[in-house]
Amino acid sequence: MRGRMFATGGGMALLLAACASTPLSHYYSLAGQDAPAPALAASQMEYKAGSGQAYGLQLQVRSIPADVDRSQIVVRDPAHAPAVDVLNQSIWSAPLDQQVQRVLATGLATRLGVVDVQRLPTAPGMLVRSMDVRITQFDLIWGQGAYLSAVWTDQGMTGKPAQVCQAAVQSKAPVGVANLVNAQKRNLAALVSLMADPTASPVGGLPDDTQVNHIGCT
């Protein structure tokens, strides 16, 4: 019995030593605290489509760059370009494309004062505004910051012509994974503003360390 306990104790000691030597994983999210979804009645009162009807927003992120589409956070090192660092202990809390879609859809629906149809059902007969988004750049760069580029197609609603827009934004950040993730959050917030109104100048509403490199629609 004592020998058995000794063996068990030795095994536990080895297990604890192994655990102590294994680096802990840290999880990161692009989402801040979720804004409350606008109520259907409120959206009907606050925002009207051209036909006089309220509408719902359906936003879909169709693609993100393949080299960052993984659970580990990928950071670029200017000193070793084009190589990238895959941070095995720095993990996204959810698939990256799903996080980007939720941030954009929730932020834009809240900004426009309409219903995000992926979170709330629409009323019978309500128009739906469809937007397809492709993230073309999603870079976190050591010692520089975060870079984000996107192309989106605003299908509008029935009878409205589609509009294709593209934008590029960047935010500075000191060294550190959390700092880079926070910089990308600021980029996504800026992108929401540009998608809400591509013709408006967002400069006055952006943090000092965030800037729009390009915005245009056809």
Image: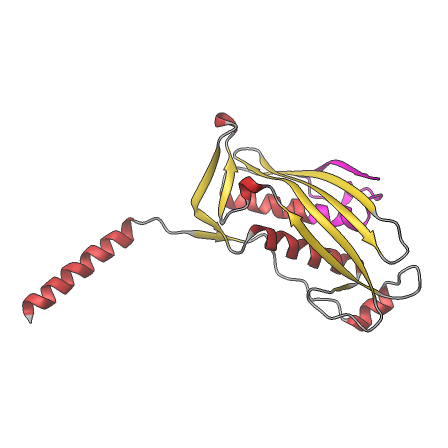
The single residue placed furthest to the front in the displayed view is: 159
Q: Position of residue 187 (x, y in %)?
A: 66, 44
Residue in view at x 23 percent, y 53 percent: 17
Viewer-side residue, 72 vs 201: 72
Drawn side of residue 59 relative to residue 199, left or right: left
Q: Position of residue 3 (x, y in %)?
A: 6, 66
Q: How is the image coloured?
A: secondary structure
Write down the quadrant of residue 138 in the picture.
top right
- Quarter of the image with the N terminus is bottom left
Viewer-side residue, 151 vs 73: 151
Q: Position of residue 157 (x, y in %)?
A: 85, 57
Task: Give the vertical position of 16 relative to 119 (above or below).
Answer: above
Q: Does the magenta segment cover residue 138?
A: no
The single residue placed furthest to the right in the displayed view is: 51
Drawn side of residue 138 relative to residue 72, left or right: right
Write down the quadrant of residue 148 in the picture.
top right
Drawn side of residue 19 relative to residue 170, left or right: left
Drawn side of residue 89 relative to residue 108, left or right: left
- Quarter of the image with the C terminus is top right
Residue in view at x 11 percent, y 67 percent: 5
Residue bounds of the magenta highlight: 189-218
Residue in view at x 77 percent, y 57 percent: 111
- Tag count: 0
Q: Position of residue 89 (x, y in %)?
A: 42, 47
Q: Does the magenta segment cover residue 207?
A: yes
